[in-house]
Amino acid sequence: MHMENLASIGIWLVQFWADEEPVDQKRYLEESCKPKCVKPLLEYQACVKRIHGDDSGQKHCTGQYFDYWFCIDKCVAPKLFTKLK
Amino acid sequence: MYRTCGGNKQWLLMLLFFSSGCVQLNLREQNILCFLGLFFFICLQLNPRNREPLTSLLFNHSTFAFVFVTDMAGGVVQQLLRRKLHPQFINSSLLSPIIAKKDDAGSTSSRSLRAVALLGAGVSGFFGFSTMAAADEAEHGLACPSYPWPHKGILSSYDHASIRRGHQVYTEVCASCHSMSLISYRDLVGVAYTEEEVKAMAAEIEVADGPNDEGEMFTRPGKLSDRFPQPYANEAAARFANGGAYPPDLSLITKARHNGQNYVFALLTGYRDPPAGVAIREGLHYNPYFPGGAIAMPKMLNDGAVEYEDGTPATEAQMGKDVVSFLSWAAEPEMEERKLMGFKWIFVLSLALLQAAYYRRLRWSVLKSRKLVLDVVN
């Protein structure tokens, strides 16, 4: 009896939620992990500023970009699947 | 060979060991050289740009094999040189370089050779140490993180609801370009769908079948025994339709890529703007996880692209997780049975080990409890 009631309430709630735009959980977690990875982010931004005027096409900030996203990924990965079904 | 950041400096280590193999070194010199080689190898791997230091330290089997081979090659060269310089050394077997290395020859020519070898070793080691600077990391792609897959544990099974949703994502999003020619409809029965559901799904496709009684080929609706339909007739057609790039068959993709499950999930959900200074040409898209960074496939998983039957919100991450669960199952359908078997047999073998240990000690007890008495006659 209880399980059926809970299930019906759950279905009602899901229908209610379905009206909203589903927010991608990974994007949300990446945003929330930004404070943890400030140092590589600042390094990346410093690099961007450094190569700003360059037109030779040889300079790029892949290293700092990778360091930043590696940090974000390490932060997001353990938490993401708890938010997914 | 696993390539280190800092370019492929394995050749420096090979040079070091080849030059060392060429000359006779006494035990102390061999020791020093081995430590030197190991030290420089570790330094190569522990540079700050290397994002997977532990992996690159532990999994360089091929490097060590090459090092061993070059050492042996150096030994052979030494043997040849000896034959040229000292014609009286007739006993020439490949084993003698190993034995000879233990002795100290002490002749002038070998001494100078030894000095040259050690100098060469020092120089090559120095260069290996100094050129640890930045390399092209985009070449390997960004290392993907490890996600806590529900089927990751030693006794964990697949999430079959996830496989079902993943199959839906594959059919609606991926099947237009990617084939899965090793999976049949009947494989889905009992895993993600009931038999009736799969029969209905199969019947929706048209399959070309063999000659009929009149000798003509005909098309018929699909059956359980048919493979998944292919989007293109052959690889050339696939390349032509996709700007020269071949969308790989996905039947075994999670086994065919290093760290496949995590890699595919990271790739599918990892489409981002390229870093400053990186320009991707028209027709390609930037994905940091793809080796080189420029992938032909556009971002396919967008929020709401699929409407799940069970009402799960179809976000990018959700679809990514489901499709990777499906692909993991497709590549390793035997996983659950394998884990059960593994658990059972490891248990049985550990009991057998205990029994064997007891029996061995029982039989050896006679010898191990012997007493030898030296009777001195005097």
Image: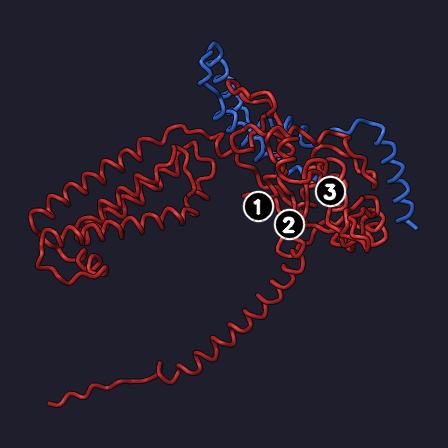
Q: Amino acid type of disc 1?
A: Ala
User: What mark, if any, has residue B183 been given in the picture?
Assistant: none
The image shows residue B75 at horizontal and vertical percentages of 22, 52
Which comes before the other along the chain, label 3 or label 1? 3
Q: Is residue B329 visible?
A: no
Left or right of B310: which side holds B123? left
In the rendered structure, are the residues bearing label 3 and label 1 in contact, judged by CB atoms less than 8 Å apart?
A: no
Q: Nearer the viewer, mark 2 or mark 3?
A: 2
Q: Between residues B6 and B362, which one lies in front from this camera angle?
A: B6
How many numbered dots are placed on residues in this image? 3
Left or right of A1: which side holds B145? left
Chain where mark 1 sits: B
Q: Residue under label 3, please give it.
A: B166
Q: Which quadrant of the figure contains the C terminus of chain B? A: bottom left
Chain where mark 2 sits: B
Give neighbour class at mark 2: few <14, some 14-19, many 20+ (Cα, 10 Å): some
Q: Which chain is blue?
A: A
Cα distance between the residues tagged 2 and 3? 13 Å
Q: Which chain is red?
A: B
Which comes before the other along the chain, label 2 or label 1? 1
Question: Residue at the spot x=42%, y=47% of the render?
Answer: B58
Q: Are labels 2 and 1 on one chain?
A: yes
Q: Is residue B84 visible?
A: yes
Q: Residue under label 1, please give it.
A: B256
